[in-house]
Image (spheres, helix red, strand yellow):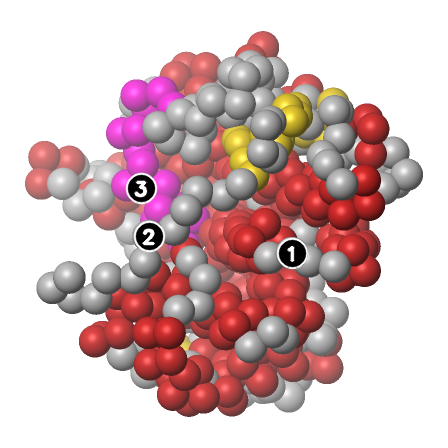
Amino acid sequence: MTKTCKNSAKFIVTTMVCAFAFGLAQTAFPAWLDGVKELKVGDRTFPVCPEEEWARAGFPLRRVPDDKNAAIEYINAINLYVKEPENLSDLYNYVLGNLWTDEAKALVPWLEQNAPAIAALREGARKDDCMFPLLKEPGVAMMNLLLPHLSTMRSLARLLTIQGKYFESQGKYREALDNYLLIARVGYQVSKEPILISGLVGVALDAISAKAIEEYILRHEVQTETLMWLLEKLQTAPSAAENYRIVISGEKAFGMSVVDDLFQNKLSLADLLGRKPSLRVALPARGMKLLGLKAIMKSDFRKYWNWMEEWNSLPDHIALRQENMRADEIIEELPAWSLAKLLVPAISRARIAFVRDKATRSMLRAEIALRIYRNQKGQYPESLAAMKGTVEDIPVDAFTNEPLRYKRTEDGFVVYSVNENLVDDGGEIGERKEDKDLVRRYPLPRREPFKGPGQ
């Protein structure tokens, strides 16, 4: 990431939060929110902004009828959710990354408390679409959006993971897998909104799902029939990564709206630059208009988005080649005070997160197919190509559009993606997830037993 991107990292978070506005405003709620001005989400009540305000700002509208909108049940699940007890937080975190232990029985009452929330989550997952309402005081700037539901959606995904581990401990393996697949389904639905932050949360839920499934199939001797069923589910179920173009479809309108808010005195440059004392230099709107800055700022956005729209039309494996990654170069050409320079770096990086999600899903499919092959042949194959017949198509690395890399080892295997540097590092893992390769190994490392406080 360039220095420009790093310097704007703090603002990027705010940008993605603000991007949430356009998708929420696009929904008509003829029954659920008809005339409602406030909505309870968790332990607080938030103002509901009329969708007409966002339509006037130029955001793309998509109407989701109540009978198809999973957000209704998801808000209900959020309101029913009971956070894990503080005295069990260490145990909670341990079970998330490991198998169920005898000590984890202390979590059972908490799971039982959350049965209504899980039921609401399952009901929402049966619906076809998802659009949350816009939570913002009407008339205020887009930068003041409220997104109280997204963090709890992650917590609900973790709740499903822990319940799945509990099912595994009881030998209810199919029920456990249903939980893990449900997490991916929820992630897919959340990412169907044209909102960047929602898409990134959807990808995060997909990662939680994939990790839980991987742990399951590699730590248990799973029957071939179950593995075949799971593989078919993953091959046919949609994933959050497929919704990349949806989640960025309103970002251009969002950027233009931020400029409008600035010139209508809803925002100051200090608001945009992180409220740093040295940057409290906002000009009156009239003065900025006289200088023609509004037209210049909007022109900067259009320049970036003309490139972005062309770049988004390229296949993933071509778009991510170094010669086509010109976002930072375009941003560097903009004036230091340009709003586009502040707002757009996160968008150019976001696609990599979605491609990484595709690569992760491919590696998971490969791991399942490898376990099926071993069940049938008694050993792992010499190459992925040898699995033809076990799977319809050899899983592809989304970063290269070529088969994933694979090595059979003395006691297992290594399967990996070359990741965003597009270099085969031989299955080596970097310090950060963006460094070197994305790697999956079997056998999994031995887990340390749970150690409670003071141990």
Which of disc 3 and disc 1 is earlier in sequence?
A: 3
Comparing marks 2 and 3, which lies closer to the viewer? 2
Residue type at mark 1? Glu
What residue would you read off at disc 2? 448
In the rendered image, residue 167, in percent from the top left (x then y), is placed at 56, 75
| Rendered residue at 49%/43% (across/down) | 444
In what element is the residue under mark 3? helix
Q: Which residue is mark 1?
A: 221
Proximity of marks 2 and 1: CB atoms separated by less than 8 Å: no
The magenta stretch is 1-17
Label 2 element class: loop
Name the residue: 34% across, 68% down.
92
* Secondary structure mostly taken by the magenta-highlighted segment of the chain: helix
Label 3 CA crowd tier, 10 Å (few <14, some 14–19, many 20+): many
Nearest the viewer among 61 and 156 is: 156
Query: Between marks 1 and 3, how big is the CA–CA gap?
Result: 47 Å
Q: What residue sits right under mark 3 in the picture? A: 11
Residue 423 x %, y %: 55, 14
Vertical side of 165 occupied by 74: above or below: below
- In terms of sequence position, does the residue under pointer 2 or pointer 3 come before the other? 3
**Label 1 secondary element:** loop
Is residue 220 visible to the viewer in this orientation of the structure?
yes
Return the residue found at the far left. 277
User: Residue placed at 28% from the left, 41% from the top?
Assistant: 10
Report if residue 421 lies within the magenta region: no
